[in-house]
Amino acid sequence: MIFIGMDSLSFLFHRISEKYIFEQIFKNMADAQLNIKPMEEWGLFSNINKPLVIAGPCSVESEEQIFETAQMLQVGGIEVLRAGLWKPRTFPGSFEGIGEVGIPWLKRVQRELKMKIATEVANAKHVEEVLKAGIDLLWIGARTTTNPFAVQEIAEALRGVDIPVWVKNPVNPDVELWEGALRRLNLVGLTKIAAIHRGFSAYASSKYRNVPQWQLPIELKQRYPNLQMFCDPSHIAGQRKYVFEVSQQAMDMGFTGLFIESHICPEHALSDAAQQLTPTDLFSLLEKLIIRVGETENVEYKENMDDLRAQIDILDQDLLDILTKRMNISAEIGRYKKENNITILQPGRWETLLAQVLRKGEERGLQREFLEKIFKAIHQASIDCQTKIMNQ
Ligand code: PEP
Ligand code: MN
């Protein structure tokens, strides 16, 4: 038996109420919207039609490399150049960026080609250097977004400065860290903030370098509808041959723009050589993209769509009815098991059921992964319901 003294009880009570208060504050914070100035007013893009494109090499390597790349991109209509001065690399000894030595080369591009320049900042020192130089916009890299101390340091260094900042998702699939970084910038007064989706690290191998997990940027956009989402198809893809399909998918999801790597001579790039495109390849990619609109005034389309949606609504209603019936039977089974002192989980039964459903579903052309997700969720809900009954 464990005895709890009055002191421990009141301590516990305080901790619980403290936790409750924190949760309420956090909830209210999360409910608040970000204060974001419409992108049309940021003065970066002369034409605000989708997709807005920020392109350029992974890293600044030399004056010739950056100037020639920028020149070709500018001729093709790119107005904003991305170019990393400081590169966060996994292994020491890799090319970690040219650093502030490259700033005058970027200033030349800005001056002679009239392009706007974006670079990555990861600490207050970087911020200080780029602000002194008059770089036009910044981005926070995926590794930095994971670290609230670093983001806060950057935010403090930017307090009172009216500069646009794009925030990449953290390397781990955590919407809150991403959101937290945006909030930190907003709290020091930055209103020109946008997000970049660059995919997430995964231990399991996948065809992409970073798995997209599209539901995460969608979740962020749902929380903050006024936040503009850009996609970095280069870091998701990891290989040139996949950059187009990722870009198209981003467009189909309604993303505002692309943040994409382009190098005058990708094979010789000092970082991310496999995923960069020549400016010419970038232009043919952009040409090939199909840009779909969110809405249309076409009456026939609207009527057909209304009809199809009405059918979906009826089917969803049916699904709810069926789920309710199924859960009621599950509950009945739970009561019966309890009366007879039988365990809730019967693995043999579940395995047979799942195998049967997968086989029948696949015969009908339904995807195995989809079926597994749905039936595992249904099975879990049944177990939860029966556990509740057992414990009553
Ligand atoms: C980059 O943009 O070159 C970069 C380092 O990207 P990320 O932070 O997404 O890895
Ligand atoms: Mn890169």
Image: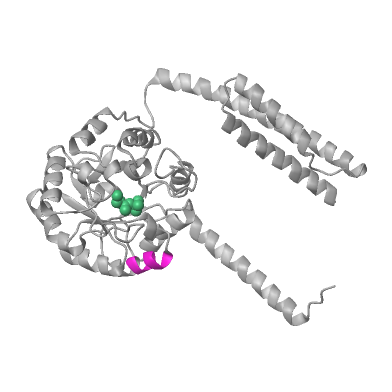
Depth check: give the residue in front, 264 or 179.
264
Magenta span: predominant SS is helix
For the image shown, how many numbered marks are present on the structure?
0
Is residue 240 one of those drawn in magenta? no
On screen, residue 169 above or below 245: below
Give the position of the N terminus as an image quadrant.
bottom right
Q: Is-magenta flag for residue 153? A: yes
- Along the line of sight, the residue nearer the viewer: 197 or 14: 197
Residue 391 vs residue 81: left or right?
right
Segment tinted magenta in the rendering: 148-154
Q: Which quadrant of the structure image shows residue 161?
A: bottom left
Point out residue 77 in the picture as x, y percentages from the top left corner: 16, 39
Residue 243 place in picture, x, y as percent = 32, 37
Residue 59 in sight here:
yes
Nearest the viewer among 216 and 59 is 59
Out of 148 and 351, give the one closest to the viewer: 351
Measured from the top left, where is residue 115 in percent x and y? 15, 49
Q: Left or right? Give the position of 263 relative to 205.
A: left
Q: Residue at x 35, y 30 (%)?
A: 293
The answer to whether one can see residue 36 in this image is no
Q: Is residue 339 left or right of residue 391?
A: right
Res 5 → quadrant? bottom right
Decide: is 230 above or below 315. below
